[in-house]
């Protein structure tokens, strides 16, 4: 996890303000929670927006089956050249609590990518052959597959037991049938190698109840959808200065998109099934 975070961030000086989050989730009451990397906000079912957790720098969010929300707070101490973090939980009744105290360094052996069985997943970046690691509730670890990947980005565990992630600009699905490349080079067909300049071309990945897979192609300012045959469709475009970074599809079929601007502002858009757009 330490290596993963270092590669994701372009420089120590700019991480806390310049690297956008992907965390956006919806609870059982249709409340949407999202991060702007300075706090966590909520859009309730009536469309009212509010800050529910101030002063937390988290890029990811996880919501469990009981509507408990999980995230972290990550910081950099420039004077000491040190990183620190703590982990938190925001319960369904609105109680905020630390579940891991202030700790030096990055989080390890903990992930916000989890399946319905409580397994956690993350990328092992210690070698050129990058692999996905699973840890169960008893902290037993294993490789999800023997496959090697080039540059594993953000991951997502679906309710169907599938693991989805971007490997540079390829979309990969791992399920009980094995490893499948859903789509290849979805940002730029001329990019054949991941570099510091282009490695953030693809951000969050998610799915819907019908099994379609979505991803935020940040470099192109679009969201792409892939059906179960791999057919590609652009379902969302956003103009300069906005860039999609994450999203979800609600049970009623609404598409919610988390966006970051070139000046690090954050907003959320909701696209209804009849293509009406609401900006929050």
Image (cartoon, rainbow, N blue to C red):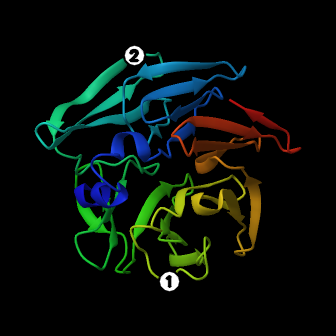
Residue placed most toward the observer, 216 or 176 = 216
Identify residue for label 2: 95
Asked whether residue 143 appears in the rendered view, the answer is yes
> Residue 162 placed where, x, y %?
52, 62
Residue at (13, 36) in percent of width and height: 79
Vertical side of 157 occupied by 180: above or below? below
Residue placed most toward the observer, 65 or 14 = 14
Q: Secondary structure at mark 2?
A: loop
> Residue 160 placed where, x, y %?
57, 57
Residue at (36, 29) in percent of width and height: 56
Q: Residues within 10 Å of mark 1 (few under 14, many from 20)?
A: few
**The C terminus appears in which quarter of the rendering?**
top right
**The N terminus appears in which quarter of the rendering?**
bottom left
> Residue 203 placed where, x, y %?
52, 57
Residue placed most toward the observer, 10 or 203 = 10
Q: Residue furthest left?
A: 80
**Figure quadrant of residue 258:** top right
Is the C-beta separation of discs 1 and 2 under 8 Å?
Answer: no
Q: Which mark is residue 192?
A: 1
Asked whether residue 135 appears in the rendered view, the answer is no
């Amino acid at each position: 996890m330490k290596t993963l975070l270092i590669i994701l961030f372009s420089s120590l000086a700019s991480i806390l303000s310049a690297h956008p989050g992907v965390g956006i989730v919806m609870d059982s009451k249709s409340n949407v929670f999202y991060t702007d990397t300075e706090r966590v906000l909520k859009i309730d079912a009536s469309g009212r927006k509010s800050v529910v957790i101030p002063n937390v720098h988290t890029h990811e969010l996880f919501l469990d089956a009981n509507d408990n929300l999980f995230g972290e707070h990550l910081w950099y101490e420039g004077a000491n050249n040190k990183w620190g973090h703590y982990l938190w939980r925001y319960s369904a009744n609105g109680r905020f609590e630390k579940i891991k105290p202030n700790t030096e360094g990055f989080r390890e052996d903990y992930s916000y990518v989890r399946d319905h069985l409580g397994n956690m997943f993350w990328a092992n970046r210690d070698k050129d052959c990058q692999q996905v690691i699973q840890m169960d509730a008893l902290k037993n670890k294993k490789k999800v597959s023997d496959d090697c990947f080039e540059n594993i980005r953000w991951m997502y565990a679906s309710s169907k037991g599938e693991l989805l992630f971007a490997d540079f600009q390829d979309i990969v699905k791992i399920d009980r049938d094995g490893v499948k490349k859903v789509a290849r080079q979805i940002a730029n067909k001329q990019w054949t190698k991941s570099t510091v300049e282009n490695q953030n071309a693809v951000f969050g990945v998610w799915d819907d109840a019908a099994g379609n897979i979505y991803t935020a192609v940040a470099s192109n300012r679009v969201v792409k959808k892939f059906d179960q045959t791999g057919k590609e469709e652009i379902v969302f475009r956003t103009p300069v200065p906005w860039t999609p970074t994450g999203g979800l599809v609600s049970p009623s079929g609404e598409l919610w998109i988390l966006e970051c601007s070139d000046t690090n502002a954050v907003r959320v858009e909701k696209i209804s099934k009849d293509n009406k757009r609401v900006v929050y």
